[in-house]
Structures are given as structure tokens and as C-alpha cells.
Image: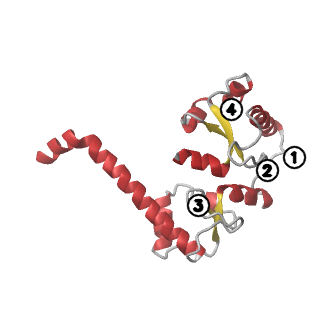
Amino acid sequence: QYNKQYYKIHRLELLEYSKKYNRENYQKKKIKVFKMISKNNIKCISCNLKDVRVLQINHKNGDGHIEMNGLNYYSFFNSIINGKRTVSDLDLRCANCNILYEFECGRRGFGVSWKGLAAFATIRRHKTIQKLGGECVDCHIKDMRLLQINHIKYGGNKERKSIGQKLYTKILNGNCKNYDVRCANHNILYGYS
């Protein structure tokens, strides 16, 4: 009875503590796994960037989407930490280099070889990014493969789920004030600010 009363009174405080504990625990596991993958030299293997906020685990053989299907990062990290999963087929790359690697390996692509809707969406995406300035507002990268639409007032995932491709129409029709363009790395870092 006492526990129920205590929880009822301190519910929000306990939830906030739980979120903070989970975030901290996640970060500790992430750093431990990064150290295991990089042999204690945590950095992007392509550009040497050391900011762990933008570093990502890359599956060299391209099966990351298969392995991670239905698996959360806690389970993935634990399988590595507990020795059930080796790291020989993994490396660390920053978000930008990871995207470029995917293009180089042919696992991502856009352009004239795409047909129908995919090509149309790519063209609209490019036009939308051009309307917003065509380069990262932080580092001025202009490589379309790396550029992303950033929601200045946050809420990008929610909006993308609710309106999807209509976001491009919204911006192309002049509603630009709540958006800018950032490379993948700077879009991630913006989320931390």
C-alpha cells in the first residue's frame, strides 16, 4: 500500500530518474562496445572524427539491417559485451562517412537508374534542399547524399510520420521558416543542443 502511495505521489520524479538512468546506462554500454570495435581508439575509420554522438556502428558486409531487424540496441550491445557476438565484421564511422560508404558499396543510391516514384521523390527532395539553401548551415557541405532537412523547432519524426512526402510540398510552397539543411553529422548534433 505504501509503495503505491509513494509511486502515485512521486510518479513523474521516478519516471525522470528512470529515463536518466537508462540514458546513462545506454551511453556506458555504447562506449564499451565502441572501445571493443575500435580496440580502444574510438574514432571514425574514414575521417578520424572522435565525437561519439555522431559515430555509428557499420556492418562491413552490409547485413546490419537484417541483424538489427527486431533487435534493440541494448540486446545488440549486450551480445557483444557478453562475447556472444564478435566485432570483426564491424567498424565505426561518423554518420556522414557511413552514408558515403553505403553509396560506395552500392547499398544506397539515387539517380537515373531509379524508376517511377523513387526517382520522383529524389528529385523533389533535391529541389526542397536547394530551396532551403542547398548546403549544411554549419559546415557548408553540398553533397546531396549527406544533406538532411532539419526541423529547427524539433518534432521531425512526428511530422514525418504524419505527413511524409508532403513535407517537400509544404517547403516548396514557401513554408520554410521552421526548417534548414544540415549534413547527417550536424543534424545529429543539433538534436543534442
**At x 74% / y 26%, what residue is drawn?**
172
**At x 71% / y 55%, what residue is drawn?**
99
Q: Which of 73 and 12 is in front in this view?
A: 12
Q: Quick one: SS at disc 1?
A: loop
**What number is the disc on residue 51?**
3
**What's the image's color scheme?**
secondary structure
For the N terminus, the image quarter is: top left
Does the CB distance between marks 1 and 2 fall below 8 Å? yes
Precedes in sequence: disc 3 or disc 2: 3
Q: Report crowding for label 1: few under 14, some 14 to 19, many 20 or more residues within 10 A (C-alpha).
A: few
Kind of residue indicated by mark 4: Gln
Precedes in sequence: disc 2 or disc 4: 2
- Real-space CA distance between mark 3 and mark 2, rounded to the nearest whole angstrom: 27 Å
Comparing labels 3 and 2, the label whose residue is closer to the camera: 3
Residue receiving disc 2: 109
Q: Position of residue 33 (x, y in %)?
A: 52, 69
Does the CB distance between marks 4 and 1 fall below 8 Å? no
Q: Where is residue 76 in the image (x, y as percent from the top left)?
A: 51, 64
**At x 68% / y 69%, what residue is drawn?**
45
Kind of residue indicated by mark 3: Asp
- Real-space CA distance between mark 1 and mark 2, rounded to the nearest whole angstrom: 9 Å
**What number is the disc on residue 113?**
1
Does the CB distance between marks 4 and 3 fall below 8 Å? no
Left-right relation of 172 to 114: left
Q: Quick one: SS at disc 4?
A: loop
- Real-space CA distance between mark 2 and mark 4, rounded to the nearest whole angstrom: 18 Å
Q: Quick one: SS at disc 2?
A: loop
- Real-space CA distance between mark 4 and mark 1, rounded to the nearest whole angstrom: 21 Å
**What number is the disc on residue 165?**
4
Which image quadrant for residue 107?
bottom right
